[in-house]
Image (tube, grey):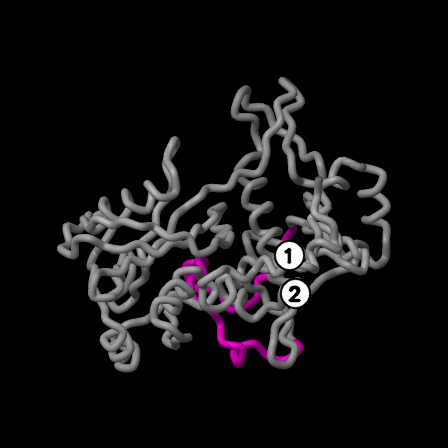
Amino acid sequence: MPVGLGDRNDVDITTQEGLLGPLLLARSAIDRSAVLRGDTAWLDRAWADGATRVVVVDDGRALVRRRGDGVDLVLLPTAEAPPGERYLLGVDAEGIAYFAVSGTLPATGPVSASGRIVSAVALSAIEEGADVVAGLRQVGSLLGDLDAGLLVYAVALEAWHATHAFCPRCGSRTETRSGGHVRVCPEDGSQHFPRVDPAVIMLVHDEDDRCLLARGPQWPQGRLSVLAGFVEPGESLEHAVAREVSEEVGVRVVEPRYLGSQPWPFPRSLMLGFFARAVSTEFALDHDEIAEARWFSRAELRAALDSGELLLPPEVSIARRLIETWYGEPLTGDW
């Protein structure tokens, strides 16, 4: 049975016990309305409704507009939406329906030369009232609850559809059904559903209450984070935590403690955050995965941040929240 709108308003699902600060990509202000996805008559009526709003998503990015101290998604009426596949995102407490459309956006906005966005954009870099193209890594921390939830959902669905256009059984082009939440093969009738890849992400601390931070070989000096890795088939989350830490840095851990989760649709991960206690501290690095690893006391972390020697993961990431939870208060010094 789907969660009702009244039930959703009674529970703050973005607050994770023991985790410092909100998980910025785990916010939402709509009911996903799964019961309506297969109702084609309702979908048609909703699309024809002048109050319905559409977020246009293009390779993980959307139009946003600065408004004072925040950034809003540019939500279009359906009559102004470009052609493209449409996906039902849900209905809000006022009964307004929201769709995503996979379409083309103007080539404008703060985009890196490689086209891969890895850094947040300061609010001051966005002109008041101007429409710019941006992705979740850039503006996820600046969006409100409604807009953040809509964009995370839209980006995740767009990424799945882009990579699952053909039937894995027979190779035929599949067709979109159920408001964009199912693809059906017209040849063999098989149904295919959006994929989510679970990944554990863990802050490891030792008996001296130091935390372990590491750098991937593709990252520049000074950019460190906690360890993470995908859950393998037939594996529990707790075993994945211990295995990944052992494989990447050679440290043995016990007592994995779950703290919270958030989607990370780049392209389809669900990040499951843990603390784990180290029972060994010597490193044996997998140099294909880890270029360096270090133990930090709180004083050492603070000094490294103040000097600019160390940069933390962006505020939009669960990695940042895990580090701040261990430290005991919010920190500054983003990638």
Q: Nearer the viewer, residue 91 or 125?
A: 91
Residue 279: percent from left, percent from top: 19, 53
Name the quadrant containing residue 298: bottom left
- As drawn, the label of residue 233 is none
Q: Nearer the viewer, residue 186 or 181?
A: 181
Residue 307: percent from left, percent from top: 26, 81
- As drawn, the label of residue 73 is 2
Q: Nearer the viewer, residue 330 or 84?
A: 330
Name the quadrant containing residue 132: bottom right
Q: Residue at x 48, y 68 (%)?
A: 21
Q: Is residue 74 magenta?
A: no
Amino acid at dot 2: Leu
Judge whether 311 appears above or below 40 on screen: below
Judge whether 315 appears above or below 233 on screen: below
Q: Is residue 9 left or right of residue 261?
A: right
Q: What secondary structure predominates along the stretch shown in magenta?
A: loop
CA neighbours of label 2 inside 10 A, class few (<14), some (14 to 19), many (20+)? many
Q: Residue at x 55, y 68 (%)?
A: 109
Residue 95: percent from left, percent from top: 81, 56
| Disc number lying in front (1 or 2) | 1
Is there CB contact under 8 Å for labels 1 and 2?
yes
Residue 255: percent from left, percent from top: 31, 50
What are the residue bounds of the magenta stretch?
103-129
Indicate the quadrant containing the N terminus: top left, top right, bottom left or bottom right. Answer: top right
Name the quadrant containing residue 282: bottom left
Q: What is the secondary structure assignment of the residue under circle 1?
A: helix
Indicate the quadrant containing the C terminus: top left, top right, bottom left or bottom right. Answer: bottom left
Label 1 to label 2: alpha-carbon separation:
9 Å
The first of marks 1 and 2 along the sequence is 2
Amino acid at dot 1: Leu
* Residue for badge 1: 150
